[in-house]
Amino acid sequence: MAARFGINDRPGLGELVRNESSLGDCVQFVDDRLGVVVAGAAGGPLAALAAKVVGSNVLPSLRNQSDAVIADLPPLLGCEFGSRLAQACGALALVLQSSITRLPEVRRAMKKLRQPAPVILNDIAAPSTPAWVSSFIGT
């Protein structure tokens, strides 16, 4: 995200949960109404950082000071802490790369969530879009 928005890669969540920076120091505004908090330095295993984020008041603080919080989370499958972070968030949407994500993977990912989530498909114009996706979106 830092590279995409042309902002600093620190401080971020890592520094925030270790009390090395304040929330005000971590929010970088890329627009009048869009602030970004990057991941920052993990300072150890990513699973440990995820546990600190879930166990801290960081997410409630962000919610209280924002109109909306959008988190770019790690995958639900193949990542030991992705579902833990997802459960700490409010409303969720599952983003799938339509040209490579298969229906059994979608079902496994959905089972890791407390409730069904809307699905956002990207890359739907790819020639290798699976038939199940094409029938789902009517293309």
Image: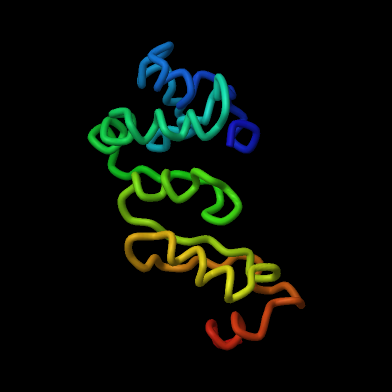
The C terminus sits in image quarter: bottom right
Residue 109 in sight here: yes
Q: How is the image coloured?
A: rainbow
Q: Is residue 44 above or below residue 105?
A: above
33 sits to left or right of 48: left
Please name the residue shown 43% across and 60% down the image. 112
- Of the pair 24 and 20, the residue shown nearer to us: 20
Residue at the far left in the pictured view: 64
- Number of numbered tags placed on the structure image: 0
- Of the pair 1 and 73, the residue shown nearer to us: 73
90 sits to left or right of 97: left
Q: Is residue 114 above or below residue 89?
A: below
x, y percent for residue 50: 46, 34
Residue 41 in sight here: no
Q: Is residue 41 above or below residue 129?
A: above
x, y percent for residue 59: 32, 35
The N terminus sits in image quarter: top right
- Of the pair 14 and 83, the residue shown nearer to us: 83
x, y percent for residue 47: 51, 34
The quadrant holding residue 105 is bottom right
Please name the residue shown 56% across and 56% down the image. 77
x, y percent for residue 89: 34, 47
Please name the residue shown 43% across and 21% down the image. 26
Q: Is residue 79 above or below residue 100?
A: above
86 sits to left or right of 132: left
Please name the residue shown 66% across and 85% down the image. 131
Residue at the far right in the pictured view: 127
Residue at the far top in the pictured view: 20
